């Protein structure tokens, strides 16, 4: 059995339980030591020239194939053959096949042992014929770089990705990469070699110098694509003969580097700016175009430029910035700086409190540079333009259908953390229009949904007030219970009575008397007091359930506010995108007016649309600020505390989503959820507690008709002072000793004028009212569960439809925009397409958060927030 695989880089492909590896090697490296990928299954030996060698393995059966350039310039194959025990190398004298049309390294896996190998070799010529047929349409693209990059080069990486994607359905593409080692002559050699190599189908320059040198050539024998914006290195004094060649494709925009940094210079009132760039850009005596552009444009703006040339070390830039006073730093490409050195240089600039600007774009702003005018979306657009140029030259062989003009949109990108470190306050208008990165604040750097709800539960003032109500209720319980325990009172009495009456008491009640008494009372049985204690206990439980219910409401309010803020963030991004689209269309309409393809009224129409878009953005910002104030109030934070929320994963509540998709089981799901909601509901539990309390109250009212109150009592008194008539008792009697009284009492109300009857009736009515409320609450719980599940199901399904609508509207906008650029449709058609795309994108963003809000409402109806309860 034979398996064929091919690719343009090191690959690992699994076929059943077997693996193949492939890699392309240079001629000089072919007979050097070859190490497979690190694995415990391999024990490596050295590879010796012209010798047979062995790789011992444990389990793999492999056939490894390598390619090298033969002496006659043809592509040749060398083979490694393996079974379970060994892997043998056959040098060119044993097996040697030349493949003039071969474009790709190829892996051939043979399953079997070496004893069957010789019978297989007779089929090898047929195999290579098949390989030639497979690769007949393959295209080789030579990419010429100025030199090797020490960091990832975003543009070139994106261009290769776009080319592979765009040409995937036409033919495979292999990239042959050459670099000029940052030397002018070496770059020229690489260009000449790639342009003269018959195996190369197209040349792509991915360096500013290589692009500059390529366009200066007099003739071009094969398709040539310029990968960099021509505006960056074009010079009126330099003639580009290939600019008019039909085999050459390039693009240029209306903006130059000085125009990109104009906003930056205005923000900081710059009079002197440092330009840090690779020495190949601003230090090569053979390439002075960029230097001349910087000095000329800065001179027009009364700004003094300070050029700092770097290679692979930031030392020169550090020393220069330390010893020179500048108002800001502009980062040109610094391809040879390592990631660590580049980060160090940014840190030094921020430490010196120097505002920084990147020509390279958003990627460098993410690393700490203050701002740029090149978002990632523009890099992708530029890469797609290059890929489209490659596709067109491959398909038609000429550039006659290609437009060289590239509408580059300047969108500010700002690192707000760097701005905060530099104490730079972003102007309101700029903040509205810019893309903000690293937007984080202390002490509440980033709030998750769980963090926000936990803080609200622990700090919300209304919830704290309810908690005090519950604590206050515990005292009602203790007070009602205390009435069943012994009561001790102290009584002090002073009085004066009629002298004749005093004499008749025989000294027991003198005319003037001060007496102290201790009174003790213990209820033995009082059904009303017992009932009151039970009622207070049940009422207290009802208060606690009410607190639980209020806590759930606070969690819901916080979660909804959290999700609504995220939704508003999405709305703000869409609104900014809408403004960018309107600006681009305004620019396009001006070009059409200049070319005579449309009327000036369309320019005014787009200016009006742009103003309306900006007004919408201002309104959205105000709405968000108001909601942020409410959110801070819920969390009991200062109302002006900045907020940064963590975004939720699209797979949030994935399990619930799957249940909603099972429509036949939805009815059963609703019933089961309703039962769970009833068992969880704190409102229902609170009503049940109140019902028990009222029933006990009714029982006490009925018992009052036939049960008396039983109590024990005692009294101990002593005369502290006495005088006047009746002070002297008869002989044998003393009025100075301690008096005591102990007994048991029974109290039964014989007649209350209907009070007991009304009390019983009132308890009955309260019970009926509570039972009715309970039945109503059950209906409301069931209703809430059914409605929230139906709403969730609808909002979940809307996500898919909204996504389809957005994709369709986006495609429509692209088509209408192209037609508008050619004058085929009116401004009304483009406005309608833009409005439709923005509305559908907004709806697409809303559906996800609307679904999550519906989930929160469902969980409130269920009285159980999964994300909250499972974390506590």
Image (cartoon, rainbow, N blue to C red):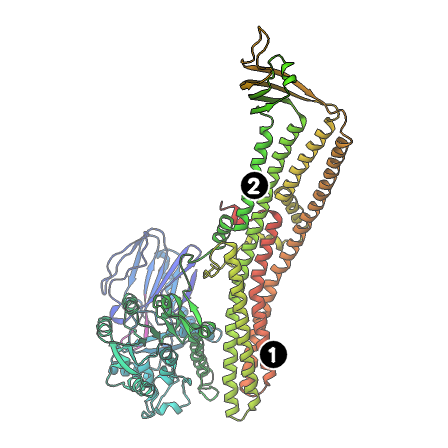
The answer to whether residue 389 is left or right of residue 787 is left
How far across and down, in percent of the image, does residue 354 sit? 30, 72
Segment colored magenta: 69-78
Quadrant in the picture for residue 158: bottom left
How far across and down, in percent of the image, does residue 678 sit? 65, 43
Q: Which disc, if any, is residue 268? A: none
Residue annotated with mark 2: 470
Q: Secondary structure at mark 1?
A: helix
Front-most of residues 757 and 626: 757
Q: Secondary structure at mark 2?
A: helix
Please say whether residue 77 is one of the residues in the magenta stretch. Answer: yes
- 194 over 548 or under it: above or below: below
Front-most of residues 428 and 375: 428
Q: CA distance from mark 1 to mark 2?
A: 58 Å
Residues under numbered marks 1 and 2 in contact, where contact means CB atoms less than 8 Å apart: no
Residue annotated with mark 1: 832
How far across and down, in percent of the image, does residue 37 sit? 32, 58
Q: Residue furthest top?
A: 732
Please say whether residue 169 is one of the residues in the magenta stretch. Answer: no
The N terminus sits in image quarter: bottom left
Q: Is residue 433 visible?
A: yes
Quadrant in the picture for residue 837: bottom right
Front-most of residues 684 and 632: 632
The answer to whether residue 16 is left or right of residue 331 is right
Front-most of residues 517 and 182: 517
């Amino acid at each position: 059995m034979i398996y064929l695989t091919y690719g343009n880089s090191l690959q690992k492909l699994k076929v059943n339980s077997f693996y193949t590896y492939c890699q392309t090697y240079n001629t000089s490296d072919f007979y050097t030591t070859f190490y497979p990928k690190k694995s415990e299954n391999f024990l490596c030996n050295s590879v010796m020239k012209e010798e047979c060698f062995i790789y011992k393995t444990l389990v793999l059966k492999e056939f490894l194939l390598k390619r090298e350039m033969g002496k006659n310039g043809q592509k040749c194959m060398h083979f490694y053959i393996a079974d379970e025990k060994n892997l043998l190398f056959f040098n060119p004298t044993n097996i040697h096949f030349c493949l003039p049309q071969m474009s790709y390294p190829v892996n051939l896996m043979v399953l079997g042992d070496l004893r069957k190998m010789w019978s297989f070799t007779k089929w090898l010529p047929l195999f290579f014929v098949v390989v030639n047929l497979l690769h007949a349409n393959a295209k080789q693209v030579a990419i010429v770089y100025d030199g090797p990059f020490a960091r990832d080069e975003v543009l070139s990486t994106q261009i290769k990705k776009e080319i592979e994607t765009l040409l995937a359905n036409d033919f495979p593409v292999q990239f042959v990469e050459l670099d000029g080692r940052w030397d002018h002559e070496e770059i020229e050699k690489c260009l000449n070699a790639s342009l003269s190599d018959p195996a190369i189908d197209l040349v792509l320059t991915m360096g500013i110098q290589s692009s500059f040198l390529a366009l200066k050539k007099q003739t071009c024998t094969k398709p040539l694509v310029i990968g960099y914006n021509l505006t960056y290195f074009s010079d009126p004094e330099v003639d580009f003969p290939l600019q008019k060649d039909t085999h050459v494709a390039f693009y240029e925009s209306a903006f130059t580097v000085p125009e990109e940094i104009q906003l930056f210079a205005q923000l900081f009132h710059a009079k002197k700016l440092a330009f840090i760039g690779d020495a190949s850009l601003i230090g090569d005596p053979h390439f002075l175009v960029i230097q001349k552009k910087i000095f000329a444009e800065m001179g027009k703006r009364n700004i003094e430029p300070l050029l700092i040339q770097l290679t692979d070390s930031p030392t020169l830039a550090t020393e220069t910035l330390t010893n020179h006073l500048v108002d800001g730093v502009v980062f040109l490409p610094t391809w040879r700086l390592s990631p660590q050195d580049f980060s160090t240089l940014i840190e030094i600039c921020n430490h010196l409190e120097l505002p920084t600007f990147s020509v390279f774009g958003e990627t460098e702003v993410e690393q700490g540079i203050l701002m740029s005018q090149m978002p990632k979306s523009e890099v992708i657009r530029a890469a797609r333009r290059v890929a489209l140029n490659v596709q067109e030259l491959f398909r038609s062989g000429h550039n006659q259908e290609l437009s060289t003009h590239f509408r580059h949109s300047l969108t500010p990108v700002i690192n707000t953390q760097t701005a905060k470190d530099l104490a730079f306050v972003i102007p309101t208008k700029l903040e509205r229009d810019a893309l903000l990165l690293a937007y984080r604040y202390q002490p509440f750097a980033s709030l998750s949904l769980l963090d926000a709800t936990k803080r609200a539960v622990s700090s919300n003032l209304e919830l704290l007030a309810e908690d005090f109500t519950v604590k206050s209720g515990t005292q009602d319980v203790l007070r009602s219970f205390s009435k069943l325990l012994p009561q001790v009172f102290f009584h002090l009495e002073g009085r004066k009575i009629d002298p004749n009456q005093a004499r008749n008491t025989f000294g027991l009640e003198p005319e003037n008397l001060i007496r102290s008494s201790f009174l003790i009372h213990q209820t033995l049985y009082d059904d009303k007091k017992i009932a009151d204690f039970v009622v207070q206990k049940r009422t207290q439980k009802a208060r606690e359930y009410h607190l639980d219910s209020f806590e759930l409401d606070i969690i819901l309010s916080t979660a909804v506010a959290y999700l609504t803020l995220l939704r508003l963030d999405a709305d703000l991004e869409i609104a900014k995108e809408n403004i960018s689209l309107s600006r681009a269309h305004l620019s396009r309409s001006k070009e059409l007016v200049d070319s005579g393809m449309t009327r000036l009224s369309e320019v005014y129409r787009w200016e009006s649309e742009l103003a309306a878009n900006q007004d919408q953005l201002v309104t959205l910002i105000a709405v968000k600020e108001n909601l942020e104030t409410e959110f801070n109030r819920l969390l009991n934070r200062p109302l002006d505390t900045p907020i940064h929320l963590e975004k939720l994963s699209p797979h949030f509540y994935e399990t619930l989503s799957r249940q909603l998709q099972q429509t036949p089981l939805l009815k059963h799901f609703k019933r089961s959820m309703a039962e769970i909601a009833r068992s969880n509901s704190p409102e229902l539990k609170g009503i049940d507690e109140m019902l028990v309390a009222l029933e006990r109250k009714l029982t006490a009212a009925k018992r009052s008709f036939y049960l008396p109150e039983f109590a024990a009592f005692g009294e101990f008194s002593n005369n502290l002072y006495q005088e006047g008539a009746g002070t002297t008792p008869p002989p044998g009697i003393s009025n100075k000793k301690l008096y005591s009284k102990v007994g048991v009492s029974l109290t039964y109300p014989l007649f209350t004028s209907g009070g007991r009857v009304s009390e019983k009736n009132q308890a009955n009515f309260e019970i009926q009212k509570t039972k009715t409320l309970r039945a109503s609450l059950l209906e409301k719980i069931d209703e809430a569960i059914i409605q929230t599940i139906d709403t969730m199901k609808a909002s979940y399904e809307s996500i898919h439809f909204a996504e389809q609508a957005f994709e369709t509207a986006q495609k429509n906008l692209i088509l209408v925009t192209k037609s508008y650029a050619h004058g085929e449709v009116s401004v009304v058609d483009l406005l309608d397409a833009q409005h439709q795309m923005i509305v559908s994108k907004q709806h697409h963003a809303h559906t996800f958060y609307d679904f999550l809000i519906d989930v929160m409402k469902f969980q409130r109806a269920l009285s159980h927030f999964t994300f909250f309860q499972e974390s506590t």
